[in-house]
Amino acid sequence: MAEIRDSARYDLVVIGGGAAGLVSSGFARALGLSVALVSDGHPGGECLWTGCVPSKALIHKGQIASTLRKYDIEAVEKQNLFREAFEHMRNARSKIAHHDSIETVEKSGVEVLIGRARFLNSNCIEVDGAKIFGNRFIIATGGYQHIPEALREAGVLTHESILELTEKPESICIIGAGPVGVEYAQTLKRLGVKKIYLIEYSDRLLPREEPEISALVKEILQAEGKEDIEIFTGFSATAATQIGDKKRVVLESKDRRIELDVDQILLATGKTAATKDLGLDAAGVRLNGRGFIDVDRHQRSSAPNIFAAGDVCGLYQFTHYADHTAQIAALGAAFPLLIPFFNREERVVPWCTFFDPEIASVGMRKEEALARHGQSNVFELKYSLADFDRAIVDDQTRGIMIALVDKRGQILGATIAGARAGEVIHEFALAMQNKIAITALARTIHVYPTMSAAVRNLSAQYYKVVAGNSVSLKMAKMISALMR
């Protein structure tokens, strides 16, 4: 850890030690800039400590428990799966932590300053009373789960504090059925939580996904949980209070009011930008209407020498997108005259919900594609995994692949619900990024038997759905007939 020196000056000062801060500081240092990384705690941020790493470790143990339960229910029930999973999560996190340690970061030449930063003006911050000057700054302070006042009394858990549990709750109410909510609903059920209530304000689970994917996820949760998982869509949690050793949650819809008594409440409704006490007004950094830092496509804020990256911008709140925007910001900081050439990607951004089966998407959903391109130029290709060889072999036939294409076969968007969807989706992302038509995927040799081979089967649907009545296909048939 570097010494905080009063009046020290750097080419670039990065504020925030999470994914975006680590990537942008390391990237800028590799480009030759003198860089200081200011972090208010141990580097690593949400992804390492409270997000991707720990949650996926729990999901992994939940999947093992689900498999074992199929064959030996009694043996599974005798184990404390919940405690074992949380121990595994903490062990995995500690083993990975060295990747983002202060020592590792400083080996790259970045100076790590531990303390809270506050802008005094657009060229100077204060860290523990010392003034630090920078030619340019990158704000990468991330986001946090805001807890409404009406829910505070009951002691609500977030994706951070749930990892501190040492004993399994018998019942839990999960507010928010986006990726975090549905992942925890399935995983906690598999780890032995007896009663789970899943609450969503919109009319379906995973509202950012295709409606049929939402329906599939609901069907799977209810099949796994039977009467132990209850789903309420179109409801808001309006109050929560402590009643003895239980927490009472009040749910309200347009015409109903429900009270639930549970052991724990998990709030998973999305993040708020972590900008409090940063002194952004003094730096001339403007926030947008949702309270996130307002940035252009170059990740530059309203202050010309101050950039922002990651969740604090309120764009796609994924670690991999934080990585991407951090690189764009670092390039802008390193080459200010070339800023117009460094644009963040907005069209081809894949993501994955680590449900079982995984739900992965890239590009547009059907409703968006129709609105942008019109009914006559959007074609939907579908392929069910129910009769796919590898899915049958692995006993993982619940799932579907969907691709949206135009008349020329260019991919507008894709969604996969199936085993290893988070890996397979990159085939579509790569094709979209390089404007490769879906027919090229159909012609590409895929290893058999693999899940990615289903991409070839789906892509072949283009010839039936789109090209089936095309002039070129009719001509090909005519020529074939003449040559027999």
Image (tube, rainbow, N blue to C red):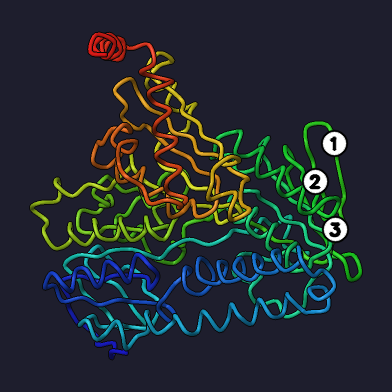
Circle 1: element type: loop
Circle 2: element type: strand
Other residues around mark 3 within 10 Å, as few (<14) / some (14–19) / many (≥20):
many
Q: CA distance from mark 2 to mark 3?
A: 10 Å
* Residue identified by numbered label 1: 256
Position in image of residue 35 (x %, y %):
21, 75
- Residue extending furthest toward the front: 484
> Residue 99 vs residue 304: left or right?
right
Which of these two is toward me, 361 or 122?
A: 361
Q: CA distance from mark 1 to mark 2?
A: 8 Å
Please report whichever mark, 1 or 2, sits nearer to the chain's N-terminal start.
2
Residue 464 vertical position relative to residue 335 in the rendered view, above or below: above
Q: CA distance from mark 1 to mark 3?
A: 16 Å
Please report whichever mark, 1 or 3, sits nearer to the chain's N-terminal start.
3
Q: Is the C terminus in the top left, top right, bottom left or bottom right quadrant?
A: top left
Circles 1, 2 touching at the beta carbon (< 8 Å): yes
* Residue identified by numbered label 2: 251
- Residue extending furthest toward the right: 244
> Residue 482 vs residue 441: left or right?
left
Circle 3: element type: strand
> Residue 111 vs residue 153: left or right?
left
* Residue identified by numbered label 3: 248
Q: Amino acid at mark 3?
A: Arg
